């Protein structure tokens, strides 16, 4: 007999073929950020963008003091986001 595939294998292959895997990863990373920082910080976040090619998450905040505080916790945030994702997807976090 031939190869045996799971439905997950087939879906993953289809997503890669049609270049949807980066979109899904981007969405998962952006949601993981929201889950990690919580609703209060999400409300003060103007923009969240993930670039899968460079593994960089860019976050724009509306409160300068919060930007300063989170800048000190970049490594902790990256680790928490990656733990939530179950992979080391995020390599860099830029807060502005």
Image: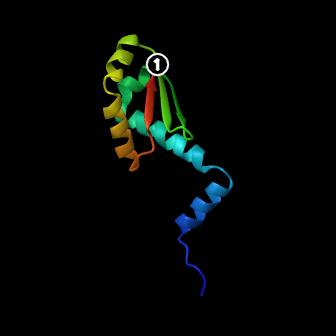
Report crowding for label 1: few under 14, some 14 to 19, many 20 or more residues within 10 A (C-alpha): some
Q: Residue at x 37, y 28 (%)?
A: 39
Quarter holding residue 82: top left
Viewer-nearest residue: 36 or 77: 77
Q: Which residue is mark 1?
A: 96
Q: Which x, y percent locates residue 48? A: 50, 29
Judging from the image, what secondary structure is the residue with disc 1 in? loop
Q: What residue lies at 47% left-to-right and 40% top-to-bottom?
A: 29
Left or right: 68 in relation to 8 = left
List the single residue furthest toward the top: 64
Above or below: residue 23 compared with residue 2: above
Percent coordinates x, y for residue 70 in the rendering? 34, 22
1 sits to left or right of 75: right
Q: Which residue shows up at 42% across the image and 22% down it?
A: 43
Q: Residue 51 at x, y = what percent?
A: 55, 36
Spot the residue most to the bottom.
1
């Amino acid at each position: 007999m031939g190869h045996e595939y799971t439905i997950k294998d087939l879906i993953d292959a289809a997503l890669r073929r049609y270049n949807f895997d980066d979109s899904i990863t981007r969405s998962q990373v952006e949601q993981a950020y929201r889950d990690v920082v919580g609703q209060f910080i999400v409300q003060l976040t103007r923009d969240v963008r993930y670039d899968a090619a460079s593994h960089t998450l860019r976050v724009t905040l509306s409160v300068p003091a919060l930007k300063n505080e989170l800048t000190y916790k970049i490594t902790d945030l990256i680790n928490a986001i990656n733990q939530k994702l179950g992979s080391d997807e995020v390599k860099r976090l830029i807060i502005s």
